[in-house]
Image (cartoon, rainbow, N blue to C red):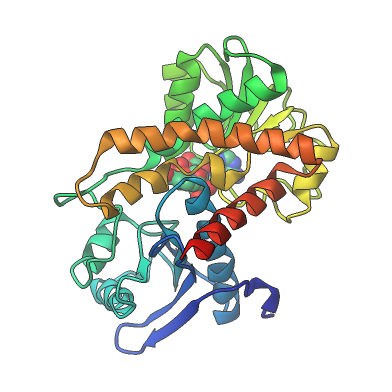
C-alpha cells in the first residue's frame, strides 16, 4: 500500500519504465537546499512499484539528513532500480539509467548502494557526468568502506567517552554484527585499540579472516544482539532494533554502520528509556558519503575527507549532549538538527 506519509517535502520524484532495456527505476530528489541531491542507487527485487516508491522516498529523505549533519554541500536524493541484481543486470539497463540521471541536469548525483557495483556505475557514467563513487578517472574516490569504518570507530569512541567516561577502548568488549567491507576495517581499528571482539556473520570466510587477523571470537548469529558486551555495532542489516530484539540487547551502547537500524522511529525513544546510548546510524556511518562527496568537488583531497570524517566524533557528542539536555532520543535530536541546518540554509538563500 502506498504510504503517503513518506512524501515529506520531496522536490521531485521521477519514474521511468524503459520498455527497450527493461529498466524500471525511481529517482527521488528530496531536498536541494544545500546542493545537488546526492545518494546511492539501490537495486532490489521489489514486489511492486509502490514498495519501490516507499523505499526511495524514505531513503532520499535520510540522505538529506546524512549530508546536512556531515557538513556537505549536498542535498538528499536516492535512486532505486527494480530488479534482481544477480540476474537482471545488462549494459543497456545501466546506460538507460545513466540517461535518466542525465535528464535531471545535475539535480541528482548517483553512486553505489546495495546491489550496485562500481562496474555498473561506470557504465552509467558513460551517459552522464552526474555519477560518483568511481574507481577510475581523475577524481575517483575508490572504495568508501574504509572511511565509513573510520567514522564508525570514532563514533564508538565518542559514545564510550560519553556513556562510560572512558577515553580508551582498551579491554572493552565490542560485538560486531557483520564483518563485510565496513565490519572488517572496523575490527582492524578496534583490535588496534585493544578491544575484545565478538563477531557474527553468515559468511564463514569473512569470519575466519577476522578471527585469524584480530583474534575475534565467533558468536552464533542469533546470539550477537543479546551477547554481554559494552558496545553493539550493527554492520550488516537494517531494522535490527525492533520490538523483538530491543529487550534482549545487553550492550549499553549501539554504534554501527548499518543503515536504518531502527525498525520504527519510536524505537529511538525505547532505547533511551532502557538506558542504551544509540549513535544515530546516518550520523556515524557518513564516512562513505563524505569520501564520495570529495569527487563532486573536483580534485580529490584526502585531507578534506579526513577532516570531515573526524568531525563525526564532535557531531555525535553534540547529539548525545542535546539528547540528555532536552530529554529526547538521539535519533530525534539528529533529525531535528538536520532539519535546522537545512532550514537555516533556506533562510539564507
Ligand atoms: P557488506 O555486504 O560488505 O557486509 C555486510 C556483511 O553482513 C556481509 O559480510 C554479510 O555476509 C553479513 N551479513 C548478512 N546477513 C547477516 C546476518 N543475518 N548476520 C550477520 N551478518 C550478516 O556491506 P558493507 O558495505 O560492509 O555495509 C554494511 C552495512 O553498512 C550495510 O547496512 C550498509 O548499508 C551500511 N553502510 C555501508 C557503507 C559503506 O561505505 N560500505 C556506508 C554507509 C552505510
Q: Nearer the viewer, residue 339 or 38?
A: 339
Total numbered labels? 0
* x and y percentages locating residue 94 in the rendered image: 29, 71
* x and y percentages locating residue 206 in the rendered image: 44, 33
Which residue is drawn at the image coordinates 34% and 49% (left, top)? 292
Which residue is drawn at the image coordinates 59% and 35% (left, top)? 316
Q: Is residue 317 left or right of residue 241?
A: left
Quarter location, residue 88: bottom left
The N terminus sits in image quarter: bottom right
* x and y percentages locating residue 7 in the rendered image: 62, 75
Q: Nearer the viewer, residue 6 or 171?
A: 6
Q: Residue furthest left?
A: 138
Q: Is residue 336 above or below residue 33?
A: above
Which residue is drawn at the image coordinates 56% and 63% (left, top)? 61
Q: Is residue 64 above or below residue 277?
A: below
Please say whether residue 202 is visible from this viewpoint.
no
Q: Nearer the viewer, residue 131 or 214?
A: 131
* x and y percentages locating residue 170 in the rendered image: 57, 10
Q: Is residue 251 left or right of residue 176?
A: right
Which residue is drawn at the image coordinates 38% and 65% (left, top)? 36
Q: Is residue 220 above or below residue 295?
A: above
Q: Residue furthest bottom?
A: 19
Q: Is residue 36 above or below residue 149?
A: below
Please say whether residue 212 is visible from this viewpoint.
yes
Q: Residue furthest front?
A: 348
Amino acid at each position: 500500500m502506498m504510504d503517503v506519509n513518506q512524501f515529506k517535502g520531496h522536490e521531485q520524484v521521477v519514474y521511468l519504465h524503459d520498455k527497450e532495456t527493461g529498466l524500471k527505476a525511481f529517482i527521488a530528489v528530496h531536498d536541494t537546499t544545500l546542493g545537488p541531491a546526492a545518494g546511492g542507487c539501490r537495486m532490489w527485487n521489489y514486489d511492486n512499484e509502490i514498495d519501490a516508491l516507499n523505499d526511495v522516498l524514505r531513503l532520499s529523505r535520510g540522505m538529506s539528513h546524512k549530508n546536512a549533519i556531515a557538513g556537505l554541500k549536498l542535498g538528499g536524493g536516492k535512486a532505486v532500480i527494480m530488479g534482481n541484481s544477480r540476474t537482471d543486470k545488462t549494459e543497456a539497463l545501466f546506460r538507460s539509467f545513466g540517461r535518466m540521471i542525465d535528464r535531471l541536469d545535475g539535480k541528482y548525483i548517483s553512486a553505489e548502494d546495495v546491489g550496485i557495483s562500481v562496474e555498473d556505475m561506470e557504465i552509467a557514467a558513460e551517459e552522464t557526468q552526474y555519477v560518483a563513487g568511481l574507481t577510475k578517472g581523475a577524481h575517483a574516490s575508490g572504495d568508501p568502506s574504509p572511511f565509513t569504518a573510520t567514522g564508525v570507530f570514532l563514533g564508538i569512541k565518542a559514545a564510550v567517552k560519553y556513556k562510560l567516561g572512558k577515553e580508551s577502548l582498551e579491554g572493552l568488549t565490542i560485538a560486531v554484527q557483520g564483518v563485510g567491507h565496513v565490519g572488517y576495517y572496523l575490527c582492524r581499528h578496534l583490535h588496534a585499540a585493544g578491544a575484545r571482539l565478538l563477531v557474527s556473520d553468515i559468511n564463514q570466510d569473512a569470519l575466519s579472516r577476522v578471527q585469524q587477523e584480530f583474534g575475534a571470537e565467533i558468536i552464533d548469529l542469533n546470539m550477537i544482539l543479546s551477547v554481554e558486551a559494552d558496545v553493539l555495532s550493527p554492520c550488516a542489516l537494517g531494522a535490527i532494533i525492533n520490538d523483538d530484539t530491543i529487550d534482549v540487547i545487553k550492550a549499553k551502547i549501539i554504534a554501527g554502520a548499518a543503515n536504518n537500524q531502527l525498525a520504527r522511529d519510536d524505537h529511538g525513544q525505547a532505547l533511551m528509556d532502557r538506558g542504551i546510548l544509540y549513535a544515530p546510524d546516518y550520523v556515524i556511518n557518513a564516512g562513505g558519503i563524505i569520501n564520495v562527496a570529495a569527487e563532486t568537488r573536483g580534485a580529490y583531497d584526502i585531507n578534506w575527507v579526513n577532516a570531515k570524517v573526524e568531525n563525526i566524533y564532535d557531531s555525535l557528542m553534540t547529539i548525545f549532549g542535546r539528547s540528555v539536555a532536552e530529554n529526547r532520543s538521539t535519533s530525534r535530536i539528529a533529525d531535528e538538527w538536520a532539519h535546522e541546518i537545512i532550514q537555516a540554509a533556506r533562510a539564507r538563500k
